[in-house]
Image: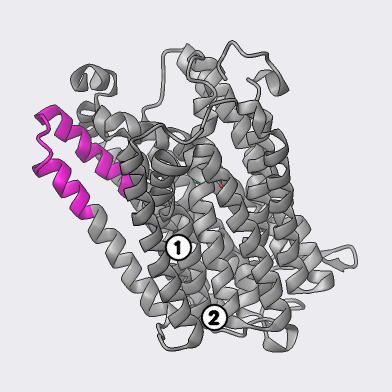
Amino acid sequence: MSADAPRGFLGQPAGFSTLFFTELWERFSYYGMRAILLLFLVGEVTTGGMGLDDATATAIYGLYTAGVYIMSMPGGWVADRLLGAQGAVLWGGTLIATGHLILAAAGFMDHRALFLLGLGFIVLGTGLLKPNISALVGQLHVRSSGGARDAAFTWFYMAINIGAMAGPIITGWLQQHFGWHIGFLSAAIGMGAGLWWFLRTRALFGTVGLPPAREPAAVARDWRILWIVVAVLALVALLLFTGLLKIAATTLSAHAMKVMLAATGAYFAYLLLFAGLSAAERRRIVVLLVLVMASTLFWAGYEQAGSSLTLFAERNTNRMLGGYEFPAAWFQSVPAIWVLLCAPLLASLWLWLAQKGRDLSVILKFALGLAGMGLGFLVMVGAAKVVSHSLLGATGNAGPMWLVTTYLLHTLGELCLSPVGMSATTQLAPQRFAGQAMGLWFTSLAMGNLLASRLAGSLDGATADGLASYFMLMFQYGAGGAAVLLMLFPLLRRWANLNQAGKDSA
Ligand code: PHE
């Protein structure tokens, strides 16, 4: 389907509504389940939780949230070579829905190994679905102008955040009233709804996103590779399941961080030293490296929304609304609500600046992103101080506005950094590395998520004073990162030379 196709939902080509609602429901399930995940892991066994200590729970949480993004690399591979984007979304959605169903069953039967298996299904499924559904948005627009394509991605971002807003509210409420397994079940039903919608309306795509036409021999070889990988994964799962293989989550998370850092470092070394790039191209790779590090740092702060900040919401925040104590999970809808409110404002700000000929460079936007992340944690220092100083007082809890303000600053940071981040990554790398550059962007998200959980895990058993100094440290990371970017700005801007990028690599 192309730009000439009849205009439908939101003035977009046919097929867009399929992507819009499928992604909305997928994010509903992802963020809804995520909102209660850590609380379930640390929850008292008597209340049906797993009763893990904070360090182990955050390690599992980190491996899970990093896993969903790192899997987009193989997920892209499978779609490009075997399934096509449509097939990848279909199978991804099926795996995700199955995963959530397994969580619901495991929560019901109090079965730990089964629970981890469910998480594994969701990781694999999201790796298949998330990158490919975004690619489909682009593919519907191969022949459209930049404006129509940008509009498509803006609407798509709205769908993501409508799902991300509704998920925690509904799942959190269900969990509070009917227990963990019903919370997990609502995520399964959400993904099921998305899948049903996708199946019902996928004919609208026509030939977009069908499996690629390739040599049968090459296809057969790739299927073999895929089945071997699946068999190995199944074997590892079986060993873990039966308890023959025992790995502590904290150990695994420490190793995973090292592996991802080493792999990213090696990849950059290869690009700089052995990829046969020109001097100008190499300078842009250095800029790319700085942006990947900045992005990792940003998400390491931002993604504590589901870990340290949720624990703060659960343990240290006053959640009374009238006579009703609302679930801590609800706070995780707040960033999405801020995105929905602030995205149009920031978009018009960028437009206004552009009209005045004062475009902000990518590097400045990244610095703003890190500053927003840091300042958000500075607000949390205040919140933690309230808790530590009012120990003798009536509640000892901080008001809800602290977290709401933190999330506003974090969201403003996200809106500065995230939208330009992906496009800058693909522009800075030479054209022939564009696909891999996209992989790098997802890797920075994965590393950020894992780092976020490792930072949050270091808080195990912290007092309110400990929380205050921890949040202060996070502020320093954000502010320090922003300061470094500002200092490097003149140099990096010259090296990035984004306007020249197309010409050089052509
Ligand atoms: N909130 C975004 C989303 O859920 C976070 C994200 C950004 C994820 C970029 C992947 C890539 O889609």
- Which of the 4 image quadrants contains residue 212? top left
Which quadrant would the C terminus be assigned to in this image? top left
What residue is shown with label 1? 452
Mark 1 / mark 2, whichever is N-terminal: 1
Taking the spot 26% from the left edge, 53% from the top edge, the residue there is 264
Tag 2: residue type? Thr
Tag 1: residue type? Ala
Label number found at residue 463 = 2
Label 1 residue SS: helix
User: What x and y, as percent, mark residue 62?
Assistant: 47, 66
Q: Alpha-carbon neighbours of circle 1 within 10 Å: few (<14), some, or many (≥20)?
A: many
The magenta-colored residue range is 265-293
Residue 274 within the magenta-colored segment of the rendering: yes
Give the CA separation, mark 1 to mark 2: 19 Å
Q: Alpha-carbon neighbours of circle 2 within 10 Å: few (<14), some, or many (≥20)?
A: few
Relative to 89, residue 312 above or below: below
- Which of the 4 image quadrants contains residue 250? bottom left
Is residue 152 left or right of 270 when viewed as pictured? Answer: right
Q: How is the image coloured?
A: one colour
